[in-house]
Image (spheres, rainbow, N blue to C red):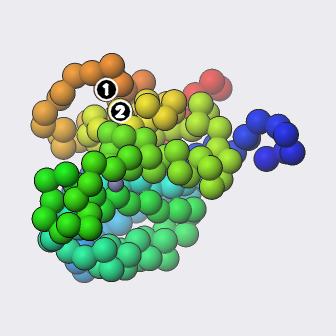
Amino acid sequence: MALGGKPTEKAVFLDKDGTLVENIPYNVDLNKVKVPDSTREALRALKGLGFKLIVVSNQGGIALGYFTIQEMEKVREWFMEKLKSLDDFYFCPHKTSGKVKKFVKDCACRKPKPGMILEAREKYQLDLKNSWVIGDVLDDVEAGKRAGCRTIFLDAGNEREWRKGKFRQPDYKAKNLTKAVEIISNFRR
Ligand SMILES: [Mg+2]
Ligand SMILES: [Zn+2]
């Protein structure tokens, strides 16, 4: 960022489960995680467009006691190692209905709240108006909209509730990550 200027870096914020990889609920077993070639290609293409690539993932399984924050840290490291295009990986360990006291919290980071995105904005001096959020549920869309990003909803069948709301109308819909990248690369061409 230029001194005293506006932030110029832009990012694509990516949900993990159901967006980068198949949605396997509460999974931290890395043997079960398969990163599709299409995901690798999508990330490379976005990187080529000049975006920082940042994962933002709800991991309420930690608050629920299904797995530990240490196990999730290993998942985070694995993704950062396997997908070199990624710049960062945030996850929220909280859930109000959890059982592990330390993580039972109405936090500011669990999507649909925009906390993880706002934290990344500070760290990387991001221009959120020119940044994007891609996710497979409307909570991803809401987090992105609340942060002032453009949003792409991946209509992969993972949204079940379709709760309506002011921030829950995506700017675009795509049937997969590859199509989402096409939308971003064609934007304002
Ligand atoms: Mg998801
Ligand atoms: Zn949180």
Q: Earlier in the sequence, mark 1 or mark 2?
A: 2
Whether residue 75 appears in this view of the structure is yes
Query: Label 1 to label 2, Cα distance in Å?
Result: 5 Å
Which image quarter: residue 49?
top right
Dot 1 beta carbon under 8 Å from ligand 1: no
Image marks 1 and 2: residues in contact by CB distance under 8 Å: yes
Dot 2 beta carbon under 8 Å from ligand 1: no
Secondary structure state at the residue bearing disc 2: helix
- Number of residues whose C-alpha sits closer than 10 Å to that of mark 2, classed few (under 14), some (14–19) or many (20 or more): many
38 is higher (above) or lower (below) than 132: below
Q: Which residue is mark 1?
A: 168
Residue 86 position within the rendered picture, expressed as x and y whole percent measured from the top left: 53, 62
Residue 76 position within the rendered picture, expressed as x and y whole percent measured from the top left: 41, 71
Q: Where residue 33 is drawn, which disc sits there?
A: none
Secondary structure state at the residue bearing disc 1: loop
Image region (quadrant) for ligand 2:
bottom left
Residue appearing at x 42%, y 24% in the figure: 171
Residue appearing at x 65%, y 38% in the figure: 127
Residue 94 position within the rendered picture, expressed as x and y whole percent measured from the top left: 27, 58
Circle 2: residue type: Glu
Q: Which residue is mark 2?
A: 142
Residue 187 position within the rendered picture, expressed as x and y whole percent measured from the top left: 58, 28
